Amino acid sequence: MDKIFINTRIAQLILLQRIDLASSFLIRMRKLFGRKFFTKFVSKYLINPEQIGKRYINDMEEEYKNISSYYDFNNKNILSIGPGVGGLELVINKKNDVNRFSLIDKNYISEKVVYGWDFKNSEAYNDLDLVQTFLTKNGVSKKKINIFDFDKDEFPLEDFNIIISLFSLDYHYSYELYSDYFKKIMKNDTILIFDTIRPQYFESLFNSVKIIKTIDNSVHKSSRIICSGAK
């Protein structure tokens, strides 16, 4: 992909959301001074936005290669849950003629980075105004974007062809937070792609569950699955 628009504030969000993009220097700073100091100071003032942006888009290109092998995004309505700043959506838009993107995420930055399982989905590292800026500055039409605050907005009730949630739904917080909502919007041909730490659990909820990627080299192992045909 061509060089993208990115600024320091957007780069900070990306780094807090995806700590694996940090340089060895930043990792040492986090270990030395702690996560709160890392969030409040290091991630704001000691980062290289262009470098983080390049690494981020390279990662999103790889994610796109993985899921696009199984699904065609052209002329589709896509719901993204926990999309971060929208890098995957940007790549999808560059390579396809998508009808519309709807994005649901939190809209605040927690005091310190805390990764792991959270039943209440209380941790957050995002700014939805910056998500809008990142997408539109990088060529996604405003008409294609609908962004929803998880804590304040009503979720969109419309037909979606595909729902995507990479390293968010059932990876950091329980699927059950969205299960009632999904029952309202998922049709027989709607597909749901997400990373989970318990892939076998979803065989009782969907007629089709396919593992398309297994991740063993992270803090907690997970599988990327495609689900369809809710029971």
Image (spheres, rainbow, N blue to C red):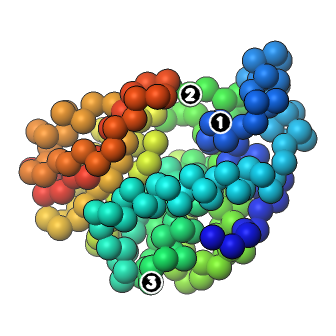
167 relative to 45 in the view: left or right? left
Vertical arrangement, residue 41 with respect to residue 181, above or below = above
Q: Position of residue 174 (x, y in %)?
A: 36, 34
In front: 17, or 127? 17
Judged from this view, the residue extending furthest toward the top is: 32
Q: Is residue 67 visible?
A: yes
In front: 119, or 226? 226
Q: Residues within 10 Å of mark 3 (few under 14, many from 20)?
A: few
Q: Which residue in the protein does label 2 denote?
A: 115
Nearer the observer: mark 1 or 2; the answer is: 1
Vertical arrangement, residue 25 with respect to residue 156, above or below = above
Nearer the observer: mark 2 or 3; the answer is: 3
Say the numbered circle drawn on residue 97.
3
Quadrant showing the N terminus = bottom right
Upstream in the sequence, badge 1 or badge 3? 1
Upstream in the sequence, badge 1 or badge 2? 1
Callout 1: SS: helix
The CA distance from mark 2 to mark 3 is: 34 Å
Q: In the image, what residue type sits under mark 2?
A: Tyr
- Residue 41 location, quadrant: top right
Q: Position of residue 131 (x, y in %)?
A: 65, 61
**Cβ atoms under marks 1 and 2 closer than 8 Å:** yes
Q: Residues within 10 Å of mark 2 (few under 14, many from 20)?
A: few
Q: Is residue 40 visible?
A: no
Callout 3: SS: loop
Q: In the image, what residue type sits under mark 1?
A: Ile
